[in-house]
């Protein structure tokens, strides 16, 4: 896996789609309400009582043909003509749109999309998975299992509708769609589309829209890895190479691989292998490895340390002092890891 240093979160921004049948229906109902309001106020100003004004407006725009209320002079007749021409068109438009959405089965789907969009708009610090094939599906599963909110984008709705995640159907390289997925509020974007050029384009779009987003891309060829990094990816993963390395590892050290699978991917074990970032001003800043191990007696086991320049130090020397930005690789129970994370992320 090729990596770049991690980057922090970005801010918050929301964009909504204007091509929504329910939205158009709301507009039509709003126009209809406006026509009724204007007609009622107009008849009231012409001398009718409020109830008679509303009644006259409704029977006019619906062309029911009931009798006029009271004696109508020139002003009343002219107003009725204008109201009839405008109101009938609005009523027909509203009924046509309502009937169309019902017959095409769009209304229920539109409501579900609006509810899903509302759920997406409420997210922050989530992950966006672009491409819901085998790799994207496995990635979404692992992230969701770890408690991360996931939004999936894919062109094929059949892949998404029965899935457990929030989703958007469309081209992941569409800037508007990325914004609707909450790109500006997300912590992570994973590009796992069918081809490297498609994924590279998504990486370019995402990086231009959110310079501080963490981006991980799946590369299908070795030659594409450098292009992903230049496009703005933070990490690039080649599943074929990883699969080959894993097969070799099983052949040479099967117990080690099984151990890593247990601590990384199983929920029913009492210990986990995780990374903990030391933030500026945290309690652990300036603490030596020896002091950390003494203070964390009975706590998680420190396996390695990744310094701010990206290099790993396995079994770091006791006199090494922790600095802001260091990443601790530790194994322990969830409670032990959480205690270590608290000391690494909370200021003195």
Image: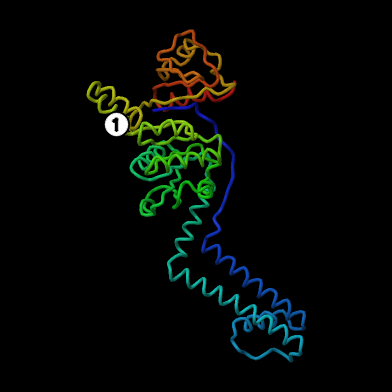
Q: Is 13 placed above or below 110 here?
A: above
Image coordinates of residue 41 in percent, x first then y, are 73, 76
Query: Residue 3, relative to residue 18: is it above or below?
Result: above
Image position of 277 (left or right of 90): left
- Closer to the camera in the image, 13 or 259: 13
Q: State how the image is colored.
A: rainbow
**In terms of image quadrants, where is residue 60?**
bottom right
Q: Is residue 43 above or below residue 289?
A: below
Quadrant for the C terminus, please. top right
To which residue does mark 1 refer?
243
Name the residue at 53% across, 18% down.
284
Q: Horizontal and vertical percent for residue 1?
A: 39, 28
Question: Can residue 90 be seen?
Answer: yes
* Vertical side of 236 occupied by 152: above or below: below
- Going by the image, does 257 lie left or right of 208? left
- Left or right: where 324 falls relative to 262: right
Residue 216 picture quarter: top left
> Is any part of residue 343 visible from this angle?
no
The residue located at (33%, 42%) in the rendering is 134
Residue at point 53% right, 30% down?
Answer: 7
Secondary structure category for the residue under label 1: helix
Single out the residue that lies furthest toward the top.
Answer: 319
Q: Position of residue 118 (x, y in %)?
A: 53, 52
């Amino acid at each position: 896996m090729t990596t770049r240093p991690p980057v922090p979160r970005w801010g918050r921004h929301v964009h909504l789609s204007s091509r929504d049948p329910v939205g158009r229906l709301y507009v039509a109902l709003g126009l209809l309400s406006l026509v009724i309001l204007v007609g009622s106020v107009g008849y009231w100003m012409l001398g009718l009582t409020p109830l008679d004004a509303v009644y006259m407006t409704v029977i006019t725009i619906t062309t029911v043909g009931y009798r006029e209320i009271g004696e109508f002079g020139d002003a009343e007749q002219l107003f009725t003509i204008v109201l009839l021409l405008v109101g009938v068109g609005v009523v027909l438009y509203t009924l046509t749109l309502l009937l169309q959405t019902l017959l095409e089965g769009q209304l229920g789907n539109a409501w579900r999309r609006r509810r899903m969009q509302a759920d997406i708009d409420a997210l922050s610090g989530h992950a966006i998975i672009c491409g819901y094939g085998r790799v994207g599906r496995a990635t979404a599963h692992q992230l969701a299992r770890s408690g991360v909110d996931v939004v999936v984008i894919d062109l094929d709705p059949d892949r998404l509708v029965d899935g457990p995640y929030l989703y958007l159907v469309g081209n992941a390289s569409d800037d508007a769609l990325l914004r609707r997925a909450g790109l500006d509020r997300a912590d992570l974007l994973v590009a796992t589309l069918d081809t490297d050029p498609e994924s590279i384009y998504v990486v370019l779009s995402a990086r231009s829209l959110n310079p501080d987003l963490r981006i991980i891309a799946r590369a299908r060829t070795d030659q594409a890895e450098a292009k992903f990094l230049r496009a703005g990816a933070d990490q690039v993963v080649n599943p074929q190479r990883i699969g080959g390395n894993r097969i070799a590892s099983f052949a040479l050290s099967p117990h080690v691989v099984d151990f890593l699978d247990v601590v990384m991917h199983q929920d029913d074990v009492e210990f986990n292998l995780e990374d903990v970032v030391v933030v500026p001003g945290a309690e652990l800043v300036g603490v030596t490895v020896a002091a950390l191990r003494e203070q964390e007696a009975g706590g998680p086991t420190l396996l390695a340390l990744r310094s701010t320049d990206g290099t790993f130090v396995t079994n770091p020397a006791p006199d090494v002092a922790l600095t802001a930005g260091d990443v601790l690789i530790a194994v322990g129970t969830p409670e032990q890891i959480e205690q270590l994370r608290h000391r690494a992320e909370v200021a003195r």
